[in-house]
Image (cartoon, helix red, strand yellow):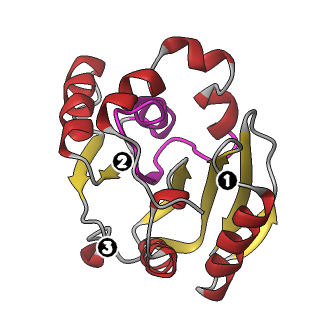
Amino acid sequence: MSNSICPWWMGYVLINPIRRFIQNPDRILSEYVSKGMNVLEVGGGMGFFTIPLAKMAGKEGHVMSVDLQEKMLESLTKRIQKSGFSDTIETRRCTDNSLLLETFADKFDFALAFAVVHEVPDKDRLFREIYAALKQEGKLLIAEPKGHVSENDLAKSTSLAEKEGFRVIQKPIIKKSRSVLLMK
């Protein structure tokens, strides 16, 4: 499994509107996110999923997008300001070894880690921190790019998540991705 981080400039490719034809955020996430939910997005980058998540959670909900790269967060902040969801979306910078969510125990209903787990060097800690941040029965959707992550690599990540207390409840089909839905 690779632990290299996607360069910040690649974020512009990832937010390309054409990507919606392949990986439509509404189609992928509407089954898991509804009005009033608190959502954690790990490695949200420039926000391909962030604003759609905020629309699903509504003004009553909250989306926290956590990313390591300042330039990604700067671009996301500009997009949030234009979207009208400034009161719904919060951005936070994490470190290369922690999401820095200690004060958010049992806060989130749903967490999304899309194309990011393979970049994280300490996956045990990642899953432990997400687990702690989720409410009882909270769900985590992991989707990894097929081009970077093999079935075996996803199985290893899933096993690490299970070691932290998660259990597999579904293996959703997401184009160009290997995916698993876990529950606390």
Q: Is residue 97 above or below residue 49?
A: below
Q: Is residue 53 visible?
A: yes
- Find residue 128 and name its label: none
Q: Quadrant of residue 33?
A: top right
Q: CA distance from mark 2 to mark 1?
A: 30 Å
Nearest-to-viewer mark from 3 and 2: 3
* Disc 2 residue crowd, few under 14, some 14–19, many 20+, Cα 10 Å: many
Left or right relative to 41: residue 140:
right
- The magenta stretch is 30-58
SS at mark 1 in the image? loop
| Residue type marked 3 | Asn
Question: Left or right: where does residue 165 sit relative to residue 76?
Answer: right
Q: Position of residue 64 (x, y in %)?
A: 33, 51
Closer-to-camera residue (114/35): 114
- Quadrant (top left/top right/bottom left/bottom right) for the N terminus: bottom right
Q: Residues within 10 Å of mark 1 (few under 14, many from 20)?
A: some
* Residue to which mark 3 is pinned: 97
Instruction: Give the mark toward the camera: 3 or 1.
Output: 1
The residue singled out by tag 2 in the image is 62
Please name the amino acid that badge 2 sits on.
His
